[in-house]
Image (tube, rainbow, N blue to C red):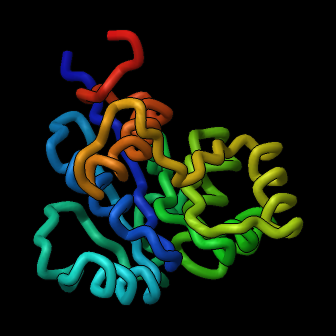
Amino acid sequence: MNKRKRKIVVAIAGSSGSIYAKVLLDKLSQMTDVVVGLVLSDNARVNWKLENHEDFNAVGYSFKEYGKQDFYAPFASGSAQYDTMIICPASMGIVGRVAAGISNDLMTRAADVILKERRKLIVVPRETPFSLIHLRNMTSLTEAGAIICPAIPSFYSDPKSPEEIAATVVDRVLDLAQLEHESYRWGE
């Protein structure tokens, strides 16, 4: 009997930190046991080009990408049974809209679906400092079942490049998504 591939939604929102999304997509592209649906905000595309020095479409990921208003995307409905959604990086705008239950585009609709179906929503905020409004929105998401995994890198693995620094966060995200991957493990 074939094992069902894990279905993952990756949403790239408009905050700085596109290196986290790039490292995440690079790692997911190496996995054969996942299906990835992808949605980007307009600002995500701008930041990708600014920070990664390349147009997102030129990278050539093989994931199925959906338009930000494509409510016919499979993960716009719980019946498609997507297991996990990762918003990386997450702007405080997307955090606030999801926390308030506003489903005005595919990204917020997918997050709403994941939460209502009691599946795993992993939010990787990349803004600083946090205002009280930001903290309350993240608290609301946590109370609704989301996992907040801030883009706060660790350094005990002695990372040597910006990509390796970003991987310290992305590896935690992949662990939270329960995806098997190679990573630095404390004490091993």
**Which residue occupies 65% across, 47% down?**
148
Q: Nearer the viewer, residue 91 or 85?
A: 91
34 lies left or right of 147: left
Q: Is residue 28 visible?
A: no
Q: Residue at x 48, y 84 (%)?
A: 69
Viewer can see residue 37: yes
Image quarter where the N terminus lies is top left
The image shows residue 45, relative to residue 118, as above or below, that is: below
The part of the image, by quadrant, that contains residue 184 is top left
Relative placement, left or right, of 149 versus 137 is left
Residue 32 horizontal/vertical position (percent):
16, 37
Residue furthest top in the image: 188
Vertical relation: 57 (above or below) 32: below
Quadrant in the picture for residue 95: bottom right
Q: Quadrant of the C terminus?
A: top left
Q: x%, y% of residue 70?
A: 44, 79
Residue sitting nearer the eye, 50 or 90? 50
| Residue at (29, 42) in percent of width and height | 159
Residue at image location 58% in from the left, 46% down from the top: 149
Between 115 and 129, the one nearer to me in the picture: 129
Tally of numbered tags: 0
> Residue 153's x, y, as percent?
47, 47
Q: Position of residue 164 (x, y in %)?
A: 27, 47
